[in-house]
Image: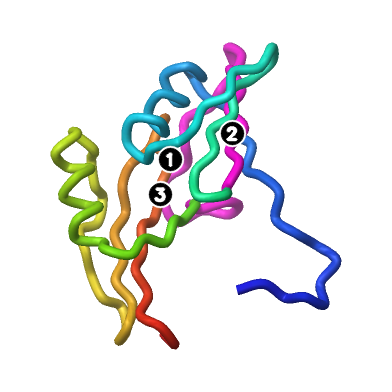
Amino acid sequence: MSDASSPFVFEHVHIQAKDAAASAHWFADMLGAQIIHGPVRAEARVGGLRIFIEQAGEGLTPEPDHPHGGLDHIAFRVTDLEAVVAGLKAKGAVFTKDITSPRPGLKISFVTGPDGMSIELLEREPGA
């Protein structure tokens, strides 16, 4: 849902990765991302979301335990969550939360992305 009165439009997410090429391939293999390799970073495009993936230097710290301050996860809406989860599991994806329904009309699941990134997959019924 967009707010036409807001001057802000979501542009991208920028991540640091231990292995930028492997992270880009994960998004391509698991989520069907289009990958654009640039001179400084890779870009994964998934469902209109641009994810800039930059190779991290030696000082990259591990992801913090949940809960923590700052960015917690990114989310993608899908139309058939059961089929998407089954497909990702068949590809070897690791899930931290199987499909649940926190409220009527909403189903969610969490998959572990590159470098332990938390990615929510969700299915919403109209009006939910």
Residue 33 in the image, given as x and y percentages of width and height: 45, 36
* Residue annotated with mark 3: 119
Residue drawn 47% across the image and 25% down it? 24
Residue drawn 19% across the image and 45% down it? 87
Asked if the residue at tag 1 contacts the one at tag 2, i.e. Cβ–Cβ closer than 8 Å, the answer is yes
In the rendered image, the vertical position of residue 75 relative to residue 105, given as above or below: above
The reply, left or right, for residue 92 in relation to residue 51 is left
Residue 122 in the image, given as x and y percentages of width and height: 36, 64
Calculate the distance from the C-alpha at mark 2 to the C-alpha at mark 1: 9 Å
* Residue annotated with mark 1: 117
Residue 67 in the image, given as x and y percentages of width and height: 45, 56
Quarter of the image that includes the N terminus? bottom right
The reply, left or right, for residue 90 in relation to residue 113 is left
Asked if the residue at tag 3 contacts the one at tag 1, i.e. Cβ–Cβ closer than 8 Å, the answer is yes
Disc 3 is placed on an element classified as strand
In the rendered image, the vertical position of residue 117 relative to residue 5, given as above or below: above
Calculate the distance from the C-alpha at mark 1 to the C-alpha at mark 3: 6 Å
Residue 89 in the image, given as x and y percentages of width and height: 17, 42
In the rendered image, the vertical position of residue 33 relative to residue 16, given as above or below: below
**Which amino acid type corresponds to the residue marked 3 in the rendered image?**
Ile
Calculate the distance from the C-alpha at mark 2 to the C-alpha at mark 3: 13 Å
Q: Which residues are magenta?
A: 49-73
Q: Residues within 10 Å of mark 3 (few under 14, many from 20)?
A: some
Q: Residues within 10 Å of mark 1 (few under 14, many from 20)?
A: some
Residue drawn 33% across the image and 65% down it? 79
**Which amino acid type corresponds to the residue marked 1 in the rendered image?**
Met
The verdict on residue 70 being magenta is: yes
* Residue annotated with mark 2: 15
The verdict on residue 54 being magenta is: yes
